[in-house]
Image (cartoon, rainbow, N blue to C red):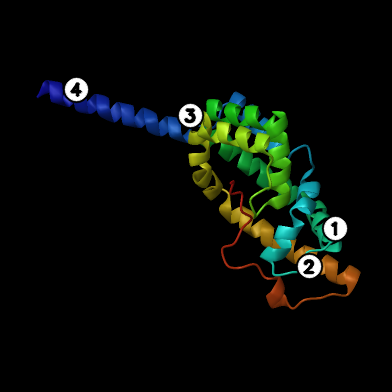
Amino acid sequence: MTMRLTALALGLALCAQAAVAADAPPSAHSLELARRLALDQMAGLSSTEVMGLQSQSMAKLFHLTPSPARAAAFQQAAAENQADVDALQEKLIVATAATLTDEEISAWIGFLESPAGRAYERKRLTAWLAPPDLTPEESAAWRAFKDSPSGRSALAKNSQLLATVLQPMTQLSVKLGSRAAAIYCQQTGDCPTAAATAAPSGSAPSTARP
């Protein structure tokens, strides 16, 4: 009986330690890696430039016709709401550091900082909701990363990671899409109905990868 009680106490203690570890904030090193990964995922662009690249897909999300003027409107909307964009980025950085291991983040960084990885990420940002058109070298580099132990485990956690920021991401998408539509209306005179500029319920930008 004494041995069983001792084993039970030890088990409870280990569970308590695991719970504390799960709730512990990310280390400074993990946050530093997550910030570096976030920069790499921007492919050297600013948030407003990324918004311009992704404007075609954003336009489709809000049932609008893509155009250079629409891209400029999305860029302006993002610039006007830079604080909200930065806040969402910070939430994603913290979630990344808390969800992925340092090894997983480092493996992702290693891929994105390679020539093929940088080209892949720029194309992914441009295509956004569609599979990017990759060269054989870029495809091979992507496969090598996603099939590696750290890459495979990191990508397996992607849905869990995005779930932590889904609500603020959706809210910001609706806010930017609505503002961009208003800017476009003011600048071009092409003013869709409110129903046309409302995002589908529960929708949010996709970060799915091929």
Q: Circle 4 is placed at which residue position? A: 6
Q: Residue at x 82, y 54 (%)?
A: 75
Would you say 92 lies left or right of 56 here?
A: left
Q: How far is mark 2 from mark 3, CA to CA?
A: 43 Å
Give the answer, above or below, for where 166 lies relative to 24: below
Specify few, some or many for label 1: CA neighbours under 10 Å numbering under 14, 14-19, or 20 or more: many
Q: Position of residue 180 (x, y in %)?
A: 79, 63
Secondary structure type for disc 4: helix
* Residue farthest to the right, as pictured: 187
Q: Earlier in the sequence, mark 1 or mark 4?
A: 4
Is the C-beta separation of discs 1 and 4 under 8 Å? Answer: no
Determine whether, in the image, residue 84 is placed left or right of residue 203: right
* Residue drawn at point x = 84 percent, y = 71 percent: 185
Secondary structure under tag 1 reads: helix
Q: Residues within 10 Å of mark 2 (few under 14, many from 20)?
A: many
Which residue type carries mark 1? Ala
